[in-house]
Amino acid sequence: MNESNQSDKATFGRGGAKGPIIPVSPSQALKPEKPPEPPRRSRRARSQLVVFLNFLLSLVVFVTIAAVAIFLYGRNEFERPGPLDQTTDFMVRDGAGLNEVATGLEQRGIITNQRIFRIAGNARLGDDTLKAGEYEIKAGASMLQILELMRSGKSILHSFTVPEGQTTQQILDRLAAEELLVGDLPAEAPPEGALLPETYKFGRGTSRQEIVDQMTRAQERALEQIWQRRDPNLPIKTKEELVILASIVEKETGRADERPLVAGVFINRLEKGMRLQSDPTIIYGVFGGAGKPADRPIYQSDLDKPTPYNTYVINGLPPTPIANPGREAMEAVANPSRTKDLYFVADGTGGHAFAATLDEHNSNVARWRKIVAQRAKEAKAADTATAPGDEVVVPAEQ
């Protein structure tokens, strides 16, 4: 009976159905059912995505390789020697952009590829610009070298030289004839003696007004420096008077070693109240800034003509300079040679004979007149036309 009961318990479960009884743990009894899984992608769909991603990756790799190749090619072209076989000049006009310059360089055969020059130029210049000017481009210059040259502004410099002793009008005439300069001359000419004769550097396209401004500033600086170093015992009271006398010294002699001596003579005369009696002042009074024609002698009537510049007639200095003196002439007046000489006359060798007395001077003048007469005879210049009733005077500085 007991065995039968146990067998029944083993045979029937809780619901009375036959079969083995499977024990269930509490955790399994409480575990919720899994949610249904979404349908998986088909193998075909997965294959298309992989292909697309592979395509994108390949495209990126290709573009990267191509970009690197193009960059390396462009850099090589930009830095390698150019096609120019001989040195040439190239003008960058004021306001020209990189595109215009690149096009002009390629058209002239100076570079091989304007696009590379333009792209690389934009990258290297940044906020910088190409400077206007005329540039000397060496044979075989690379695009990099050309770009850096134009960025530096180291353009070709030309020279404008003003000889000492020229008048302002003569200097302006030279400026007008200089083809590398642009623009008009100043509407109002600078005063006589306001320009410093020197050599001035300029780039093609510089205006004439700029050169005049340079000469004016240079004269102001030089005069101020010389005035500060002057002999304090001079009978010269202003900088303007120094320039006036220096212009006379400049016209009297072209020899640097004589300028202090000539200046000393005029200083001695001023201190003694003597008239300067300088022939160049007479010429300026007659001809003004245009200057005397080379083949025109000085007549007795010129010496007698009463002009503000005739130092045979007036006392002291003329009202303005008679030319633009150089630095050495101004320095000679500021610190003249201290001698007793009151006279000088040409000696026939390109220099002058100086004298402290009138007798000695007259002897020097007589000697000079003989030299002139002999030269005239040898040159058969006795038939030189002269104005009727007007005596030709051999220039003799006194």
Image (cartoon, rainbow, N blue to C red):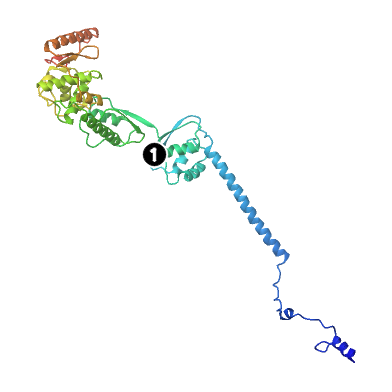
Locate residue 197 relative to residue 279 in the image: left or right: right
Quadrant of image for the C terminus: top left
- At a point 65% along the width and 56% down the height, the residue shown is 55
- At a point 70% along the width and 64% down the height, the residue shown is 45
Q: Residues within 10 Å of mark 1 (few under 14, many from 20)?
A: many
Q: Residue furthest bottom?
A: 1
Give the x, y percent position of residue 51.
68, 58
Quadrant of image for the N terminus: bottom right
* Callout 1 secondary element: loop
Q: Residue furthest front?
A: 2
Give the x, y percent position of residue 370.
18, 8
- At a point 88% along the width and 87% down the height, the residue shown is 7
Give the x, y percent position of residue 296.
20, 18
Give the answer, above or below, for where 69 lies relative to 396: below
Front one among 127 and 265: 265
Question: What's the residue type where badge 1 is placed?
Answer: Ala
Residue 386 seen from this side: no
Residue 51 seen from this side: yes
- Residue receiving disc 1: 132
Q: Quadrant of residue 394?
A: top left
Locate residue 242 relative to residue 142 in the image: left or right: left
Q: Quadrant of residue 301?
A: top left
Give the x, y percent position of residue 238.
16, 31
